[in-house]
Amino acid sequence: MNQMVMLVLILVVFYFFMIRPQMKKQKELKKFREGLSVGDKVVTIGGVHGKILEVSESTILVGLDSGKMRLDKSAISNSPEDQLQKK
């Protein structure tokens, strides 16, 4: 019985320190990606910085210094302002 209580306690701690924060972070990222609009500055998961020129259902057109690039919304990591706030 004591082992069962310890196992449940470990699972609860694991949930609150590992799973729950990750789910919260994913929800915030999804909300950020859904709220993208023309003119926003973004950073891709590959580190490319650009400005949104066009937004469609699942893709965006990003203007770069050297041209344009069409990306899937899932390739957007965050905005440059978010990176500055994290430092």
Image (cartoon, rainbow, N blue to C red):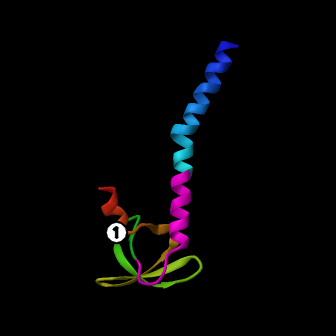
What residue is disc 1 on?
80
Residue depicted at x 56% and y 51%: 23
The residue furthest front is 85
The residue furthest top is 2
Q: Quadrant of the N terminus?
A: top right
Q: Residues within 10 Å of mark 1 (few under 14, many from 20)?
A: some
Q: Which residues are magenta?
A: 24-40
Query: Dot 1: what SS?
Result: helix
Q: Nearer the viewer, residue 6 or 65?
A: 6
Q: Where does residue 56 sit, x and y in percent of width and height? A: 56, 82
Q: Quadrant of the C terminus?
A: bottom left
Q: Where does residue 28 sit, x and y in percent of width and height? A: 52, 60
Q: Where does residue 8 sit, x and y in percent of width and height? A: 65, 26
Please state if 24 lies on the left or on the right of 86 as rendered.
right
Q: Nearer the viewer, residue 69 or 2?
A: 2
Q: 18 above or below 38?
A: above
Please state if 87 lies on the left or on the right of 62 as rendered.
left
Q: 68 above or below 23?
A: below
Say which amino acid is labelled 1: Pro
Residue 25 belongs to magenta span: yes
Residue depicted at x 51% and y 73%: 72
